[in-house]
Image (spheres, rainbow, N blue to C red):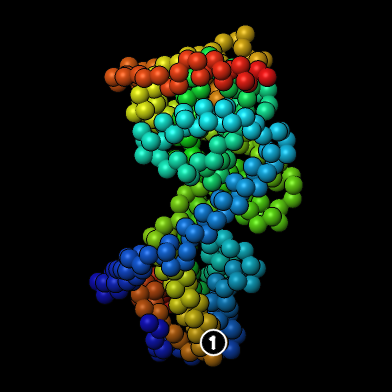
Amino acid sequence: MKKILVQGFILVVLFFSTWFGLSKADWIKILRIEKVSSQTEEKLGEALWTFFKQDAEENRDLFIKQTIDSIVSKICTANGINRSKLKIHILNKGDINAFALPDGHLVLLTGLMANCESPEALAGVIAHEIAHIESGHIMKKLVKELGLSMMISIATGSGSPEVVINAAKLLSSSAFDRKMEREADINGAEYLLKANIDARPFADFMYQLAEPGKISKLMSWISTHPESAERAEYIIHYLSERTVEADEVIAPQTWNRLQERLEK
Amino acid sequence: MIEKKMFPYKPDEHEAEKASNSYLMSLIVLIVGVPLPIVNLIATVIFYIGNRKSTYFVRWHCIQALLTQLSLLIVNTAAFWWTISIIFRGKAVTNAYVAYIISVLLLNLIEFIGTMYSAIHTRKGTHVQWWFYGGITQLICKPRS
């Protein structure tokens, strides 16, 4: 009996030591897994952005682009985020929505920008979407909902148009899971704090979404960001534990001018 | 790892064929092409149940085949669910994962070669005993009085 136990123990040790020994090799590098996955993400992002571009006209107003860019740069610089990784797109569409796509694409609809009551609220939405990108939520959500094979088929161009439409709908009109949304809220609030941007208007914006009268007007954001009142509360709670040193995100004249140009 | 040993009696042609089939049953997963780790174990269990009242030689080899499948089931199941979590739940591919898959493939390959070897030799009526698994089988399976 003792001999058998020793033999069994040797077998287990052999297996685990093989595993341990093999795990010392950098397989990710040897098999070029990261390169392959980043190429897949790049192609996927490009395919989905092409889809959205066909759906609505891209806003090419230089002033609007520069204003948004200054908000994005402020958040990125203060938080050590590589600005060049982000690809900001503004689409002329009345829907109140913003969403992130694979490979750092961040899409803002003019409807959302026009309905934000302050630059801080807009910065909050942007910070929230950047947090989704930085936490890798986009690919996780796509893999979870569509499966890896579907994503590869989109990236390689072999997928049917329906697959692309499904992926686009998933990212633009359905929520991340509660844990991911909470993580993006808290990280987004943290980004704002580090950039000396007051995050409270963003929480107010969330309360605004939760008001029953606003439901039809703010349908897109409601559907993609459920439990807004609860989320506003934990953002406020998170901020209450921190010292807020807020600067102006952009000058009030710039904000007013932005709103005027959006109305055109 | 696998030793040829003397069996208390010389099995006849019919026994040798059944005993050999018990090893082939464990390779069923390759035949049906279903990548579920449980399939080959189920096939081996069914074969064992069908032959549990058979002769000592047949029962002995059915149990040895079953035991080898049990340990494979554990490592293969872990590999299966780890892969599922990567494909469907967005878990990251890590060095530990790749190393585990290689280890599991190596183990499966060794097991496959061992199973084929056992199937060929038992078919000829030779008694083959695996390291560790043979010892446990010897403890479990006793000749009927």
Instruction: Give how far across and how far down residue B117 sits, in percent.
Output: 50, 85
Comparing B95 with B10, the one in front is: B95
Q: What is the residue that sits farthest to the right in this orientation?
A: A161
Given the image, on which type of amino acid does mark 1 rest? Ile
Label 1: state its secondary structure: helix
Q: Residue visible at 51% across and 47% down?
A: B90
Q: How crowded is mark 1: few (under 14 residues within 10 Å), some or many (20 or more)?
A: some
Q: Is residue A23 visible?
A: yes
Work out which quarter of the rendered image holds the N terminus of chain B and state it: bottom left
Instruction: Give how far across and how far down residue A218 sits, in percent.
Output: 62, 18
- Asked if B14 appears above or below A168 in the picture, the reply is below
Work out which quarter of the rendered image holds the C terminus of chain B and state it: bottom left
Q: Is residue A8 visible?
A: no
Q: Residue visible at 38% across and 60% down?
A: B96
Instruction: Tell me the subunit letter for badge 1.
Output: B
- Residue A78 lies left or right of residue A138; in this view the side is left
Q: What is the residue that sits farthest to the top in this orientation?
A: A213
- Residue B82 lies left or right of residue A77; in this view the side is right
- Asked if B4 appears above or below B137 in the picture, the reply is below
Instruction: Give how far across and how far down residue A180 sits, in percent.
Output: 47, 34
- Residue B122 lies left or right of residue A23; in this view the side is right
- Asked if A29 appears above or below A153 in the picture, the reply is below
Q: Residue visible at 35% across and 24% down?
A: A196
Comparing B105 with A96, the one in front is: A96
Comparing A39 with A85, the one in front is: A85
Instruction: Give how far across and how far down residue A62 sits, in percent.
Output: 59, 31
Q: Name the residue under label 1.
A: B120
Q: Residue visible at 56% across and 50% down?
A: A41
Picture quadrant where residue B21 is located: bottom right
